[in-house]
């Protein structure tokens, strides 16, 4: 019922910015809570940012003030705007559709110092 396709990852210098996108092929996008997660080597996958179908957002303390999550219902796309990137932000970033327990393929973000 859902297919998640991510884009926007890449290599950036510390202090730089990236915008991640996750296109969701599902008719239930508008009523589905969505989240961005990341997993770094040797660490468990962690929730970075979350947005409900109603637009309520929340962030992990480590990214608060630097990352912004948003969604476009018309385009059925989830976004993560990342600014002031740090080397510790380096990870594979995944999007997730909560109601389906379904993950995207992941996109690599690497921040060099």
Image (cartoon, rainbow, N blue to C red):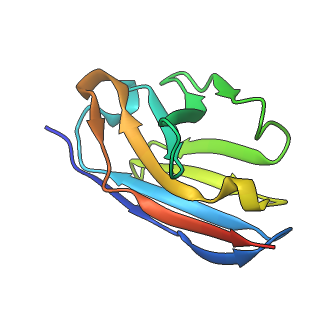
Residue 56 is drawn in which quadrant? top right
- Between 103 and 42, the one lying in front of the other is 42
Tell me what residue is drawn at x 51 percent, y 46 percent: 42
> For the point 85% across and 40% down, which residue is it?
65
Residue occupying image coordinates x 45% and y 32%: 34
Q: How far across and down, in percent of the image, does residue 50 sit?
A: 57, 30
Residue 22 lies left or right of residue 89; in this view the side is left
Residue at the front extreme, as displayed: 42
Image coordinates for residue 77, horizontal then vertical, percent: 44, 51
Identity of the residue furthest to the left in this view: 1
Q: Is residue 46 left or right of residue 87?
A: left
- Vertical side of 23 occupied by 26: above or below: above
How far across and down, in percent of the image, does residue 107 sit?
A: 44, 62
Q: Give the position of the N terminus as an image quadrant.
A: top left
Seen in the picture, residue 27 relative to 80 is either above or below; the reply is above
Task: Answer with left or right where residue 106 lies relative to residue 83.
Answer: left
Q: Position of residue 44 (x, y in %)?
A: 48, 35
Is 77 in front, or is 104?
104
Query: The C terminus is located in which quarter?
Result: bottom right
Q: From the viewer's side, name the closer residue of 83 and 79.
A: 83
* Image height of 101 relative to 84, above or below: above
Identify the image quadrant of residue 15.
Answer: bottom right
Q: Residue at x 53, y 40 (%)?
A: 43
């Amino acid at each position: 019922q859902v297919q998640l396709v991510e884009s926007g990852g890449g290599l950036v210098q510390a202090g730089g910015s990236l915008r991640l996108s996750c296109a969701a092929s599902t008719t239930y996008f508008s009523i589905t809570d969505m989240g961005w997660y990341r997993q770094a080597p040797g660490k468990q996958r962690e929730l970075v940012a979350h947005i409900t179908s109603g637009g309520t957002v929340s962030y992990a303390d480590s990214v608060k003030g630097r990352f912004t999550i948003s969604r476009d219902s018309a385009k059925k796309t989830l976004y993560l705007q990342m600014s002031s990137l740090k080397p510790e932000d380096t990870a594979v970033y995944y999007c997730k559709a909560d109601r389906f327990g379904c993950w995207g393929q992941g996109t690599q973000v690497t921040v060099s110092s």
